[in-house]
C-alpha cells in the first residue's frame, strides 16, 4: 500500500468521524447536544454591569478585582446549568454578560449580581429582646473567638465549606443546607451555645433571609429556610462560588427575542449553501477534473470544520457564520493558487506527476504567507472582541481562524492526495485546464 492510499484511508476515517459528530444517530454520541447558538440567533439575556471599585479590597488592584468578578460570574452561571455564557470585561470597570436561552431576566440578575455576603447575627437582648420600629427583632453581628485566640466581629460566608439544596423534613420545603469549615464550626458552636433557646438570624448582603430559635448547640452545619426552591438553588450556588469582590450595578439590560435571529439564521444558511454550490460549480467548469476533486475536498472540509465547531464548542452567531462562509472561499482560493501554478508547469511541458509536485511546492509559500496574515488579523479581532465585550467580533475571528487553518490542511493534503491517487491508479491520465487545451 503506497503513501497516497494510506492518506486516502485516513481522510475517509476523518470524514466519517466528522459526520458522526455533526449528524449523530440516536443514542449517546459525541456532540449530541448540538451546535451552540449565540444571543442573536437563540435569544436570551443581555446585561451590562458596572463594578464599584471604590469598595474593593485595598490589597487588590482594579485588574485583579475585575478578573475575579468575571471568573465568579462565569462560575455562578455555569453552576446553574446554563450553557453558552459569554462574558467579558468592557473598559476598566464594566462587565458584559450574554446568556443565550435564558429569558427570565430577573432570575439572571439575581443569580449574577448579588454580592452574596452571608453573615450570622444574634438577637439583641437587654433584659428582654430589643425590637425594631416595625416590631421585628433587632439583631447585631454574632462575634466569636477563633482557634488561635483572635476574635472576629462576625461569622461570615468566608468560613463556609459547602452549601447545597435539601428538603426540610418538617415542612417538606426547599432549604439551603450548609457546612462550616473548622474555624466556622468553632465560631458557630460558640454562637449557638450562648443563644440556646434564643433567636439568631442569617443575613445576605445586609438583608435578613432567615431567622430561627436555637434548639440545640450546633457546630459544623446549618440551614436557611423560608425561600422558594429557585432562590435556594441560586443562594447555594452563590455561597459555593464565594462572594463577589465588589458590588455590581446594572447599567444596561435587555431581553433579546430570537424570532428575528431564527429567520436570519435560515436565510444565512440558505445563502451559504447556494454560495458553496456556485463556487463548486465554477471550479468544476473552469478546472475540469481538478475542479471536481476540489468540490469533493470542499465537502470534506465543511464537515471537518463543522465538527470542530461542535466539539470545542464554538458559539455560532451571524458574524461567526459569515466567518465560516469566508473561510470556504479562502479554502477554494488556496486550490486556485495551486492549479494556476499547475497550469504553468503543464504549459511548460512538464511531466504530469512532476508538474503536480512542483505546483504544490511552489504555491505553498503564497498560501502560507497569506494565511499567516489572516491569522494575525483574527488574533487582533479576537483581542478586540474580548477586550470590549464584542462577542460577535470574537466569534467571527474564531470561526475564520479555524476555517483557514483547516483550509490549509484541505488544500495541501486532501486535494493533493486525491489527485495523486487517481493518477497513480490510472483513473485519470491528465488534467483538462482550458488554457492548457488552448495552447496544446
Image: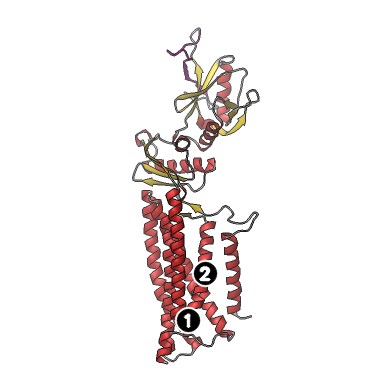
- Magenta-drawn segment: 128-145
Q: Quadrant of residue 240?
A: top right
What SS does tag 2 mark?
Answer: helix
Q: Which quadrant does the N terminus fall into? A: bottom right
Q: Give the residue drawn at x 36%, y 37%.
A: 53
Left or right: where 270 falls relative to 424 = left
SS state under label 1:
loop
- Which residue is the site of mark 1? 288
Instruction: Using a 10 Å C-alpha cutoff, classify the residue at mark 2 as few (fewer than 14 neighbours), some (14 to 19) or many (20 or more).
Output: some
Q: Which mark is residue 299?
A: 2
**Quadrant (top left/top right/bottom left/bottom right) for the C terminus:** bottom left
- Decide: is 249 above or below 138: below
Task: Residue 219: name its quadrant.
Answer: top right
Q: Is residue 133 magenta?
A: yes
Q: Specify whether 103 is left or right of 249.
A: right
Pinpoint residue 364: horizontal percent, then vertical percent.
43, 76
Amino acid at each position: 500500500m503506497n503513501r497516497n492510499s494510506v492518506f486516502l484511508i485516513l481522510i475517509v476515517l476523518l470524514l466519517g468521524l466528522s459526520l458522526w459528530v455533526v449528524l449523530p444517530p440516536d443514542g449517546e454520541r459525541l456532540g449530541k447536544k448540538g451546535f451552540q447558538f449565540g444571543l442573536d440567533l437563540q435569544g436570551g439575556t443581555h446585561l451590562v454591569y458596572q463594578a464599584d471599585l471604590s469598595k474593593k479590597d485595598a490589597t487588590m488592584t482594579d485588574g485583579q478585582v475585575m478578573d475575579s468578578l468575571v471568573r465568579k460570574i462565569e462560575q455562578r452561571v455555569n453552576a446553574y446549568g446554563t450553557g453558552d455564557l459569554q462574558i467579558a470585561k468592557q473598559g476598566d470597570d464594566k462587565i458584559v454578560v450574554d446568556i443565550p436561552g435564558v429569558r427570565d431576566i430577573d432570575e439572571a440578575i439575581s443569580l449574577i449580581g448579588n454580592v452574596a455576603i452571608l453573615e450570622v447575627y444574634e438577637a439583641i437582648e437587654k433584659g428582654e429582646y430589643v425590637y425594631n420600629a416595625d416590631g421585628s427583632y433587632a439583631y447585631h453581628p454574632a462575634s466569636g473567638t477563633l482557634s488561635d485566640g483572635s476574635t472576629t466581629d462576625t461569622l461570615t460566608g468566608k468560613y463556609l465549606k459547602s452549601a447545597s439544596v435539601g428538603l426540610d423534613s418538617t415542612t417538606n420545603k426547599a432549604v439551603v443546607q450548609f457546612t462550616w469549615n473548622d474555624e466556622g464550626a468553632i465560631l458557630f458552636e460558640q454562637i449557638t451555645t450562648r443563644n440556646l433557646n434564643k433567636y439568631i438570624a442569617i443575613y445576605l448582603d445586609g438583608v435578613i433571609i432567615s431567622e430561627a430559635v436555637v434548639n440545640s448547640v450546633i457546630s459544623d452545619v446549618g440551614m436557611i429556610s423560608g425561600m422558594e426552591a429557585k432562590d435556594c438553588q441560586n443562594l447555594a450556588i452563590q455561597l459555593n462560588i464565594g462572594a463577589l469582590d465588589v458590588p455590581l450595578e446594572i447599567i444596561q439590560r435587555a431581553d433579546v427575542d430570537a424570532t428575528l435571529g431564527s429567520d436570519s439564521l435560515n436565510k444565512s444558511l440558505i445563502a451559504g449553501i447556494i454560495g458553496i454550490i456556485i463556487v463548486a460549480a465554477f471550479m468544476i467548469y473552469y478546472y475540469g477534473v481538478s475542479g471536481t476533486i476540489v468540490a469533493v475536498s470542499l465537502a470534506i472540509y465543511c464537515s471537518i470544520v463543522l465538527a470542530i465547531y461542535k466539539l470545542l464548542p464554538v458559539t455560532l452567531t451571524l458574524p461567526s457564520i459569515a466567518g465560516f462562509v469566508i473561510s470556504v472561499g479562502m479554502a477554494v482560493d488556496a486550490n486556485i493558487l495551486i492549479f494556476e501554478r499547475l497550469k504553468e508547469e503543464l504549459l511548460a511541458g512538464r511531466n504530469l506527476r512532476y508538474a503536480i509536485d512542483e505546483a504544490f511546492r511552489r504555491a505553498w509559500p503564497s498560501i502560507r504567507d497569506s494565511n499567516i496574515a489572516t491569522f494575525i488579523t483574527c488574533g487582533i479581532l479576537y483581542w478586540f472582541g474580548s477586550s470590549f465585550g464584542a462577542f460577535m467580533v470574537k466569534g467571527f475571528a474564531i470561526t475564520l481562524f479555524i476555517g483557514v487553518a483547516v483550509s490549509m490542511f484541505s488544500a495541501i493534503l486532501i486535494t493533493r492526495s486525491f489527485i495523486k491517487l487517481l493518477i497513480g491508479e490510472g483513473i485519470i491520465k491528465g488534467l483538462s485546464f482550458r488554457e492548457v487545451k488552448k495552447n496544446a
